[in-house]
Image (cartoon, rainbow, N blue to C red):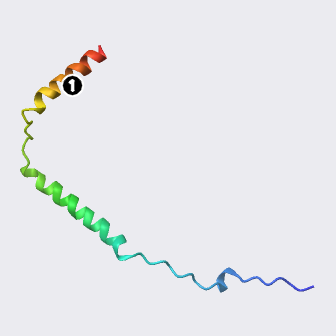
């Protein structure tokens, strides 16, 4: 009766590690730099002005929401 041949875990050849493509590192770095630039540049930001046509529309929508909630 022949014995079953099994390799020990020490005799296994090491599996090659998969390499990341270049963009897998570049995309997070670029996105971080863009977000950092946006946050750093926001210190000069002022209050946004509401266009003339948008103010009355927002008031009407606020009245509708208030009347529906009551």
**Considering the image in quadrants, where does the C terminus appear?**
top left
Query: Residue at horizontal 20%, vertical 19%?
Result: 63
The front one of 57 and 17 is 57
Q: Position of residue 11 (x, y in %)?
A: 66, 86
Q: Is residue 1 above or below residue 24?
A: below
Q: Is residue 36 above or below residue 5?
A: above
Say which element carries label 1. helix
Residue furthest right as drawn: 1
The front one of 4 and 10 is 4
Q: Residue 65's image quarter?
A: top left
Query: Residue at horizontal 31%, vertical 67%?
Result: 27
Q: Position of residue 25 (x, y in %)?
A: 34, 71
Query: Residue at horizontal 16%, vertical 60%?
Result: 37
- Near mark 1 (Cα within 10 A), the count class, few <14, some 14-19 or many ≥20, is few
Residue 35 as seen in the image, left or right of residue 4: left
Q: Residue 2's image quarter?
A: bottom right
Residue furthest front as drawn: 53
The residue that label 1 is drawn on is: 61
Residue 53 as seen in the image, left or right of residue 62: left
Q: Position of residue 47 (x, y in %)?
A: 8, 41
Query: Residue at horizontal 25%, vertical 62%?
Result: 32
Q: Residue 4's image quarter?
A: bottom right
Q: How many marks?
A: 1
Q: Position of residue 50 (x, y in %)?
A: 9, 36
Residue furthest top as drawn: 70
**Considering the image in quadrants, where does the N terminus appear?**
bottom right
Q: Is residue 63 above or below residue 11?
A: above
The front one of 30 and 12 is 30
């Amino acid at each position: 009766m022949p014995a079953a041949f099994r390799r020990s875990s020490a005799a296994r050849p090491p599996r090659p590690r998969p390499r990341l493509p270049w963009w897998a590192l570049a995309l997070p770095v670029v996105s971080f730099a863009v977000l950092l630039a946006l946050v750093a540049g926001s210190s000069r930001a002022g209050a946004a002005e509401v266009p003339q046509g948008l103010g009355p529309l927002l008031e009407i929508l606020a009245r509708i929401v208030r009347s529906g909630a009551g």
